[in-house]
Image (cartoon, grey):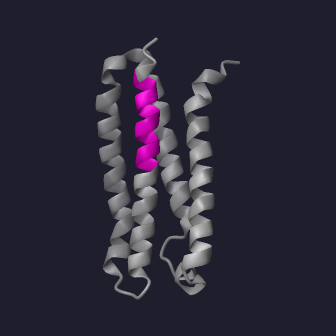
Amino acid sequence: MNLQKFKSLFTLLVFAIIGYASHKVIFHFWVPKTYEDSFIYTVELLYLFFFFFSSMLILVLDKVKQKSINSVGYTFLLLTTIKMAIAYVFLKPILAANLEKTPTEKMSFFIIFIYFLTIETYVTIRILNNKQ
């Protein structure tokens, strides 16, 4: 079995687990439990949402790499734009809420979004650097 195909997904999984654990530790010490309980989307749901889309993006990029390495960058930009549009739809209820916990929830959403975008960029760079 060729495990090299799954190296990018494994990298994503490891970084997602590290990010989630760090996020929960930070929330445990600095965010009141009542804030976290009243979030529109739980931290777990956001991590699952972004992990799902990131893994789909990485799988598509691996397929595109097999067909044409020159199209990987354009595909990354297209899929990232689509993901951003879907994330905005998820973000709209948070933006519409005007509660005391809303700034914390917005910051949490954007940190998770940027974190997964960084991971995707890192994996894409690794895919592009392995032009075999």
Work out whether 17 lies above or below 36.
above
Work out whether 78 lies above or below 37.
above
- For residue 64, say whether it is visible: no
- For residue 106, say whether it is visible: yes
Outermost residue to the top = 132
Left or right, 47 with respect to 81, comes to: right
Outermost residue to the right = 1
Measuring 59% from the left and 60% from the top, which residue is drawn there? 22
Residue 35 forms part of the magenta stretch: no
Work out whether 11 lies above or below 63.
below
Q: Quadrant of residue 101?
A: bottom left
Measuring 39% from the left and 71% from the top, which residue is drawn there? 106
Q: Nearer the viewer, residue 17 or 84?
A: 17
Q: Quadrant of the N terminus?
A: top right
What predominant SS class does the magenta segment belong to? helix
Residue 100 lies, in percent from the top left, at 41, 88
Residue 63 lies, in percent from the top left, at 46, 24
Work out whether 94 lies above or below 116.
below
Magenta residues? 116-128
Measuring 63% from the left and 59% from the top, which residue is drawn there? 21
Looking at the rendered structure, the number of numbered marks drawn on it comes to: 0
Residue 3 lies, in percent from the top left, at 66, 23
